[in-house]
Image (cartoon, rainbow, N blue to C red):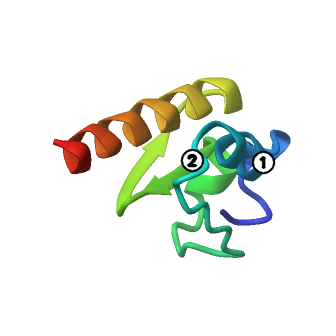
């Protein structure tokens, strides 16, 4: 996630690592989506952009995508 990313209002790394200890959370300074990070909070989940209007909503969507990925690989 970029330093300018609005999702940085939350400690997403800590939250997700505590909720999903088997999931690797990687923080990047820049993901080369210039402009998006200043408009909406977003993250990449296994190669898919996840974004929303608020940081909390984005975190909920990230959780849902993580759950979807975990279910796929557990299947």
Residue sitting at the far left: 75
Q: CA distance from mark 2 to mark 1?
A: 16 Å
- Report x, y in % for residue 49: 41, 52
Q: Nearer the viewer, mark 2 or mark 1?
A: 1
Query: Residue under circle 2?
Result: 42
Foreground of the two, 25 or 45: 25
Q: Earlier in the sequence, mark 2 or mark 1?
A: 1
Q: Quadrant of residue 69?
A: top left
Residue for point 83% across, 41% down: 9
Q: Secondary structure at mark 1?
A: helix
Q: Residue at x 38, y 38 (%)?
A: 65
User: Circle 2 — which element?
Assistant: strand
15 and 29: which is toward the camera: 15
- Rendered position, 10 above or below 3: above
Label 1 environment density (alpha carbons within 10 Å; few <14, some 14–19, many ≥20):
few
Q: Is residue 15 above or below residue 56?
A: below
Height in image: 14 above or below 15? below
* Quarter placement of the N terminus: bottom right
């Amino acid at each position: 996630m970029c330093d300018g990313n609005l999702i940085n209002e939350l400690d997403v790394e800590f939250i997700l690592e505590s909720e999903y200890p088997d999931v690797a959370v990687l923080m990047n300074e820049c993901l080369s989506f210039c402009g998006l990070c200043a408009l909406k909070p977003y993250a990449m989940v296994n190669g898919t952009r996840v974004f929303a209007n608020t940081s909390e909503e984005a975190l909920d969507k990230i959780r849902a995508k993580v759950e979807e990925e975990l279910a796929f690989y557990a299947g």
